Amino acid sequence: MAKTQRSFLSLSALFNVRNTVIVLCLLVMGWLGAAFALDHKTIFLPGVTSNGHLLFEASCASCHEGFKPVSNDTCMRCHEAEMATDAHGPKKFRDLRWAAELEKLEVLTCTTCHNEHVHMFDRGVHLKPDLCMICHEGIIQGELASHKGFSPDGCWTAGCHNFHDHRSISTGFLRQSMGQADMLPKPALPARTFKPELTAPPQPDLGKELLGGQA
Amino acid sequence: MRNWVLEGLLLLVLWNGLTISALAVDQAQLQSINQSWSQSAHAFADVNCSSCHQNSSTKQVTQRPNHESCRSCHESQVDTFLLGKHGIRLLEGQTALTPALAHLPMQAAAHNKQMNCNTCHDVHSVKTLPASVDSCLTCHKDTHSLNYKNSRHAELLREEGALPRPSTVSTTCATCHLPRQTSASGTVMVNHNNTFTLLPRDRMVKEVCMNCHGMEFAYNSIFDDDLVESNFARPPTLSMDTLKMVRALEKQRSGNSQSE
């Protein structure tokens, strides 16, 4: 009798564990389904979103089309202006002198350096700050006397080099602009001008339509 | 149960009534709007009430036109606005940005302001000077922003007196953060992508600082965090190693050319 009782107990215990697992699974699925249906998509975020994308992180479709990997086109939808003068763009790597470098680091794919929802070092870059060394190690090892012994992670973190845009930070530009006065002789801000089309303002063409009731 | 439904309906009606009355204007408000508009650049450019408040095909009148309406004339301004932090939520089909969602310190009284063109621009007076400083400071209250009023840049602006729009020497918040740019066709437009010149800092130097300042002055200022925080309260004291290296290179090259 005592034996039957025990086996009955262990059976019911097993039964309960199974039930609990099923119920838990259903709860989790229900929770995820509700989150999806009610548009609380932030619970699907796999990690912290970078500062630049944080404000619209709940809009998954901004960057993701189903489960396809994020493509350059997705990034360029917003970042075209920043990439207009890309120093490490397709034009550089079409040159046979540099084409083979792409095998070391596929820099023509945005996500190689700019992943999302992972830890970022700075400027939305998730690779370690010494990433330049993958191709440019020689610079700090004596190829360029002025840079010999420099820290491998300082190229961009110290603010001296800009991977995509070196128009205002290239040696040529700096040499050319050395010795300029603190204040340039003439401010170069463009003026905004306005040429009126009419000599007198017209009569307002809406009035009562804007009063009360109509939203 | 029926009571609940009735209460819900009542609330809905009340809410609708409230939103309509909040949007609608009375006779006195309309008069003051017309007065302000009649002296504006819009009026003199023949941009009338219906240009923004009425759909040209359906003739439907709208109390609150949004950025889509502005875009019908100011395309590049709106397009750049939508790419910056101020407008990106609208571009991505989310609710408008409010200071409450921001990660920078913001004025508590402004927390619920919805970011759209008319949050910063008085669309009836169309004076862009208030939009270039006062509007920014309605929301932003970080140290750099609050220090602007005590800066040399602000002093220059005050010395200019009353202006319809910032001049070629006015240095406002917008001069640096929403800079004027000349397109290939020669049109001057304001880049409303507020994050475009922010980082990396060398972009600010090239696009903004060097419109007025020499390169060394600009770099030695923008890379000094304290100076940036003080909103450039004093001339720069930094002496960047990069610039020392370029000077050394220059000396070496001129030395070489002399010995040749």
Image: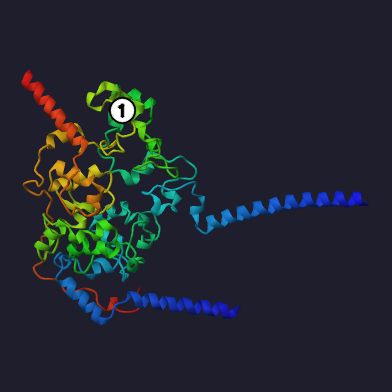
Q: How is the image coloured?
A: rainbow
User: Where residue B11 sits: x, y (%)?
Assistant: 48, 78
**Quarter the C terminus of chain A occupies:** bottom left
Q: Secondary structure at mark 1?
A: helix
Q: Is residue A65 visible?
A: yes
* Image quadrant assignment for residue A76: top left
A149 sits to left or right of B6: left
Locate residue B209, reporting x and y percent. Answer: 17, 47
Q: Is residue B220 left or right of residue A6?
A: left
Q: Which residue is mark 1?
A: A93
Task: Tell me the residue at 13%/29% (across/down).
Answer: B250
Asked if residue A40 lies left or right of residue B77, the reply is: right
Circle 1: residue type:
Phe
Q: How many marks?
A: 1
Question: For the point 82% across and 49% down, which residue is it?
Answer: A10
Residue extending furthest toward the front: B237
Provide residue A140's location: percent of width, then percent of height.
29, 26
Q: Position of residue B139 (x, y in %)?
A: 30, 63
Q: Circle 1 marks a residue in which chain?
A: A
Category of crowding for the residue at label 1, using alpha-carbon neighbours closer than 10 angstroms: few (below 14), some (14–19), many (at least 20): some
Q: Is residue B98 visible?
A: no
Residue ranking furthest to the right: A1
Between A63 and B57, the one lying in front of the other is A63
Q: Nearer the viewer, residue A180 or A189?
A: A180
Q: Quadrant of residue A113?
A: top left
Q: Is residue B10 left or right of residue B137?
A: right
Q: Dividing the picture into quarters, in which one does residue A166 lie?
A: top left
Taking the spot 61% from the left edge, 53% from the top edge, the residue there is A28
Is A100 placed above or below A174 here? above
Of A149 and A138, nearer the camera is A149
